[in-house]
Amino acid sequence: MIASFPTLVKTLLKQLSPCDYPVLNSRLFFEIWLTFVLDKSLASMRDLFYRLNHAGVSVDMSTFSKACKTRQDQHFCRLYVELMARLKRKNSATAQMLIPLDSTVITLTSKLFWAQKYHQVKLLNGINLTQRNPTECLIHFGQGHDALFADAVLSMIPENGIGIMDRGFAGWSLLDQMSQTKTLFVVRIKNNMKTELDHQRYRVVWFCDLESRTEFRLATNVESMTNEEVSETYRKRWQIEVLWKFLKMHLKLDQLITKNINGVSIQIYMVLIAYLILELMEIPAFYGHQLLDKLRYLQLELSRRCSIIHWSYDLLPETLV
């Protein structure tokens, strides 16, 4: 039995009402999304509903689609913030934390989105390498330069953190605003950007990758680091790419199944919630300790049950359908 997954799920389900809607209540709505995201044996939501309808759970896919369009994502956002806070308490903060920030783009293929002039959705997020928790996220439909989301970027970097960003954030207005608010950063700037900078705020560090023959120029306002430490800090920006890879390969971030803005936002929040659950849950040491080991062990437990929805009947017998 998983050491903490049932406890985590039970705590979350208790915060959702089992009877606020006559057919698809908030608790069941959350359970359906959690099952789809975490169960890798499900290729589509239609597969999940076939399994539910033939295993004692009477709920229509059209009802679920309507709920995705009309229900707000406030419950999902609240649970996401709560799990982030729990992970922060689990992993203590240090005097200097590194926060890689970046955005990933998910293509929208439905013509319903195209009619609204939306061809992609952008998820702007970061990860605290010390506490292993994602930062607050920004979900933006349409195109937009990362440097334009200054307020969101500033909210993602804690007071004792250093934001590590790629060239998408290389805008002098953003860097000036971060310097004025005393927000520490290491940002790769474009090679054609002017370097007549105010050295009292930040400096430019140059270094070269001899293997790829690529020149890197990093703007930073961290004075306590040497040039070598600045370049080594920037290399850790790749961890945010590792996060995107895990979310897309294993938690179906790039398999958007709804055709409305509200449903897409809910699915993105659900993917991030599932990631936090995996970070918080514990499994027997025999099975490993990596995030992928936890997910594989969870697949083993799910194979013994029909779904997380049926599993929840053992956790909360009073659950109503």
Image (cartoon, grey):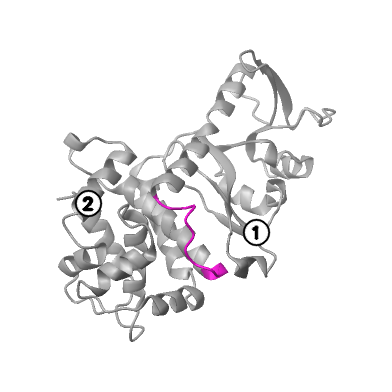
* Nearest to the observer: residue 246 or residue 108: 108
Q: Percent x, y for residue 154?
A: 63, 48
Q: Which quarter shows the C terminus?
A: bottom left
Q: Percent x, y for residue 108?
A: 58, 59
Residue under label 2: 4
Q: Is residue 237 above or below residue 321?
A: above
Residue under label 1: 119
Determine the image quadrant of residue 206: top right
Residue 144 shows in this picture: yes
Magenta segment: 251-262
Kind of residue sitting beneath label 2: Ser
Helix, strand or loop at disc 1?
Answer: loop
Q: Percent x, y for residue 24?
A: 35, 79
Q: Residue at x 66, y 53 (%)?
A: 151
Residue furthest to the top = 210
Q: Residue at x 25, y 62 (%)?
A: 308
* Nearest to the observer: residue 57 or residue 98: 57
Q: Percent x, y for residue 209?
A: 63, 17
Q: Is residue 242 above or below residue 12?
A: above
Tell me whether the residue at label 2 lies in contact with that at label 1, contact meaning CB atoms closer than 8 angstroms. no
In the picture, measured across the screen, residue 150 lies left or right of residue 87, that is right
**Which is more N-terminal, label 1 or label 2?**
2
Kind of residue sitting beneath label 1: His
Q: Is residue 178 above or below residue 29?
A: above
